[in-house]
Amino acid sequence: MISASTTSLPPAILAQRYRLERRLAQGGMAEVWLGTDLLLTRQVAVKLLKPALAADPVVAERFRREAIAVALLSHPNIVAVYDTIDDIIGGERRQAVVMQLINGKSLRQLLDEQKRLSPDLTMHIGQCVAAALDCAHQSNLVHRDIKPGNILITSDGRVLLTDFGIAKGLYGNENDDLTSPNVMMGTAKYLSPEQVRGRKLDGRADLYSLGLVLYECLAGRVPFLGETDADTALARLNRDPTDLSRLRPTLPHGLAQLIHRLLARRPEDRYASGEAVRSELQRIAAQPRRDYDETGPRDTSRGGSRDATRQQTPSRGRTMPDPRPVSATRTPTPVSGYQPVRAGR
């Protein structure tokens, strides 16, 4: 990992407005910087396409379209896009997307730290992402890359979806698409069967991927893994996932069934919309239920301590998750699921 003090460009001001302060993270295609909007005096996240990729007109146009697509969406569970920039830095043409800065961490980081999450937190995440997807689908956009790295959680429990970099219009001109129909777009572990087969997609492909994310939150692993990305992608075409209720027998009634319906191989067997998923998760979360630990019902009438199992144990009537696993003092987590650059490495 490159040190945070080693940058690929000097401190600069983009479009005479956005001052780049320090690099927060990097991925294969882009870097994410902490920036200051000099006009509005606020901090922002600036996603810079790497110079070699900016020279590719197809990649550069896809990058630009991400900004345009998301800027049209206005939803509390979607990371806001403020601006798109085409500028010269250090003699090189650079393209950038200016976005809302999120204080928190990605769901990928949270799962790496905790492995499994409580049903309450999982349902809260599911409701928020389903609502975000419903907004995108209503605007005729399919995200195509729903995964834990693209889901951000703030210190106060807000959940936001980010990285629409490979999003595709539902009803646009197929000849205008910037991705090859023969290439699987997305991350192998979280692809829908129709993505693996290269078929035409609608919003139900995103709902399948959301099902995989929720399954991982509860089981501690995705249901399909192979020796290679291709094996992983193809596994969902040949077998069904292990019954989630066997892995977590004490889940709230209906939660495992909801997730398995999201994971139906045929799109027509899944929920029809993100709103339908959000509504059903809300109903399940609101159900009265007994206190459980991981082995079965617990008798709390004899003065036993509840604190030891609070993170795994849903409390009666509590529908909002405990946001304590997300530290309020963390460095702002960059959007798009990039891993933060660590100083001194």
Image (cartoon, grey):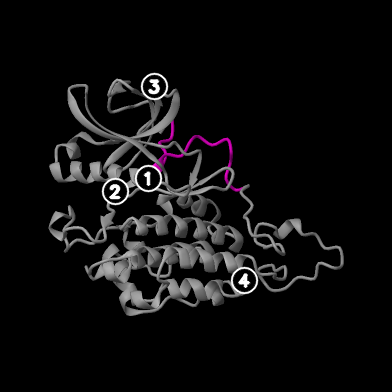
Q: Residue at x 15, y 46 (%)?
A: 58
Q: Is residue 73 visible?
A: yes
Q: Which mark is residue 185?
A: none
Q: Earlier in the sequence, mark 1 or mark 2?
A: 2
Q: Are marks 2 and 4 in contact (CB under 8 Å)?
A: no
Quarter of the image for residue 336 reads top left
Q: Which mark is residue 336?
A: 1
> What secondary structure is found at the residue carrying circle 3?
loop
* Disc 1 from disc 4: Cα separation: 31 Å
Query: How far across and down, in percent of the image, does residue 317 sit?
Result: 70, 63
**What residue is at 24 percent from the left and 41 percent from the top?**
64
Residue named by callout 4: 252
Query: How far apart are the alpha carbons under marks 2 and 4?
Result: 35 Å
Q: CA distance from mark 2 to mark 3?
A: 27 Å
Q: Which residue is mark 3?
A: 39
Looking at marks 1 and 4 on the same chain, the residue that comes earlier in the sequence is marked by: 4
Q: CA distance from mark 1 to mark 2?
A: 9 Å
- Gap between marks 1 and 3 measured at Cα: 25 Å
114 is within the stretch colored magenta: no
Magenta residue check for 342 = yes
* Picture coordinates of residue 74, whole percent (x, y): 41, 46
Q: Which residues are magenta?
A: 325-343
Q: Residues within 10 Å of mark 4 (few under 14, many from 20)?
A: many
Magenta residues, dominant SS class: loop
The residue identified by callout 2 is 165
Label 1 or label 2, whichever lies nearer to me, is: 2
Circles 2 and 3: CB atoms closer than 8 Å = no
Mark 3 against mark 4, which lies toward the viewer? 3
Residues at discs 1 and 2 in contact (Cβ within 8 Å): yes
Q: Position of residue 249 (x, y in %)?
A: 60, 75
SS under mark 1:
helix
